[in-house]
Image (cartoon, rainbow, N blue to C red):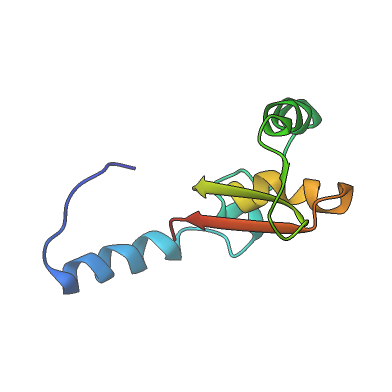
Amino acid sequence: MTSEVIEDEEQFYSKAKMYWKQIPPTVDGMLGGYGRISSIDINSSRKFLQRFLRVGRSGVLSRRGCGSGGPLAISWYLPQGLEELGWVGTL
């Protein structure tokens, strides 16, 4: 896959439609082959994110993030004591 700027809206959506026709309609397809996360990645992320864990003004244990794919990457953390998750990312 190459990266190019497409100014024409019709061409942009036409190319996007062609691309997505080739992708299987699965979680793995939608996430570009990253439908599962290894335990090594999860444990490393947990250690890294511990530095940013805090209790907010409301007393709620929360975390904020920004980026692409983050909700998948840290969804494992919610059942482990995190009460709130805010995320800003790309579509």
Please state the horizontal and vertical placement of residue 30, each as a whole percent of the image. 55, 57
Q: Quadrant of residue 20?
A: bottom left
Eyeballing the image, is 43 above or below 4?
above
Q: Nearer the viewer, residue 2 or 53?
A: 53
Can residue 36 be seen in this snapshot?
Answer: no
Eyeballing the image, is 17 above or below 77?
below
Please state the horizontal and vertical placement of residue 48, each as a whole percent of the image. 68, 27
Please state the horizontal and vertical placement of residue 72, each as a whole percent of the image. 66, 50
| Residue located 88% across and 47% down the image | 80
Classify residue 23 as left or right of residue 1: right
In the rendered image, the quadrant that contains the N terminus is top left
| Residue located 73% across and 51% down the image | 75
| Residue located 61% across and 58% down the image | 86
Please state the horizontal and vertical placement of residue 64, each as a whole percent of the image. 60, 49
Query: In the orientation shown, which residue stands out farthest toward the right?
Result: 80
Q: Nearer the viewer, residue 70 or 39?
A: 70
Query: In the orientation shown, which residue stands out farthest toward the bottom?
Result: 10
Q: Nearer the viewer, residue 85 or 27?
A: 85
In the rendered image, the quadrant that contains the C terminus is bottom left
| Residue located 20% across and 47% down the image | 4
Classify residue 14 as left or right of residue 21: left
Q: Nearer the viewer, residue 12 or 72?
A: 72
Can residue 34 be seen in this snapshot?
Answer: yes
Eyeballing the image, is 41 above or below 21?
above
Label count reads 0
